Image: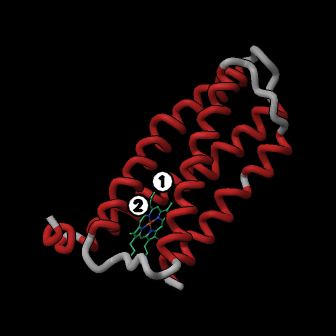
Amino acid sequence: MSDLLADFYLWTKAFHVMSVLAWMAGLFYLPRLFVYHAEQVKACSDAEAMFQVMERRLLKAIMNPAMISTWVFGLALVMTPGIVDWSMVWPWTKAASVLAMTAFHMWLGGRRKDFAAGRNTLTGRRYRMMNELPTLLMIVIVLSVIVKF
Ligand code: HEM
């Protein structure tokens, strides 16, 4: 198993980065949709129905599969011999950040359900603020895996 993971290391990393790109695109875009949904869209309008479809498809067709494949390829990299040295700081900052990113994903899923049920209570301003979180986490993650402090 270890030999197989070592042989496919670069392939695994390539698919990990592709999955990350798709996941991050959704994590940046869905809160923007929520901003416009909360600020511009009237209840029971055609626009309301369209936003609900866009949000559901973005989450279910792109973000959920992308998050799962990011985790699968990421954990395969963790298990590849010689890649992660747990005595260094970077694996821990990365692990904490990806757990926070996953929690943010779940939180967005909950807010999508609120919009779908017509019970959203958060303002566009709040969604704008929440939109900064994946950016901050992405900075910590990329510095962790590239600079490897
Ligand atoms: C979800 C759980 C994740 C796990 C378990 C994980 C784990 C890993 C591991 C072990 C590596 C290999 C590091 C190396 O080859 O030295 C890696 C590479 C990488 N990860 Fe993740 N990762 C995860 C999520 C993410 C996320 C969310 C991002 C971006 C926001 C990300 C960005 C990257 C990048 C850019 C690389 C390539 C670094 C290089 O040039 O070698 N990862 N990941």
Instruction: Point out residue 93 in the picture as x, y percentages from the top left corner.
Output: 56, 70
Measure the alpha-carbon separation of dots 2 and 1. 7 Å
> What is the tally of numbered marks visible in this picture?
2
- The amino acid sitting under disc 1 is Ala
Q: Is mark 1 within 8 Å of ligand 1?
A: no
Q: Is mark 2 within 8 Å of ligand 1?
A: no
Where residue 127 sits, quadrant-wise, is: top right
Instruction: Point out residue 67 in the picture as x, y percentages from the top left corner.
Output: 45, 49
Q: Are the residues at dot 2 and dot 1 in contact (C-beta closer than 8 Å)?
A: yes
- Residue at 41% from the left image edge and 60% from the top image edge: 18
- Residue at 56% from the left image edge and 62% from the top image edge: 96
Residue at which label 2 appears: 18
Residue projecting furthest to the top: 44
Instruction: Point out residue 32 in the picture as x, y percentages from the top left corner.
Output: 71, 45
Q: Which mark is residue 22?
A: 1
Q: Is residue 58 left or right of residue 114?
A: left
Q: Is residue 3 left or right of residue 107?
A: left
- Residue at 62% from the left image edge and 70% from the top image edge: 139
Question: Under tag 2, what secondary structure?
Answer: helix
Label 2: few (<14), some or many (≥20) within 10 Å? Answer: some
Instruction: Point out residue 99 in the picture as x, y percentages from the top left corner.
Output: 54, 55
Q: Is residue 37 left or right of residue 80?
A: right
Where residue 71 sits, quadrant-wise, is: bottom left
Label 1: few (<14), some or many (≥20) within 10 Å? Answer: some
In the displayed structure, 28 sits above or below 7; it is above
Residue projecting furthest to the front: 87
Q: Which mark is residue 42?
A: none
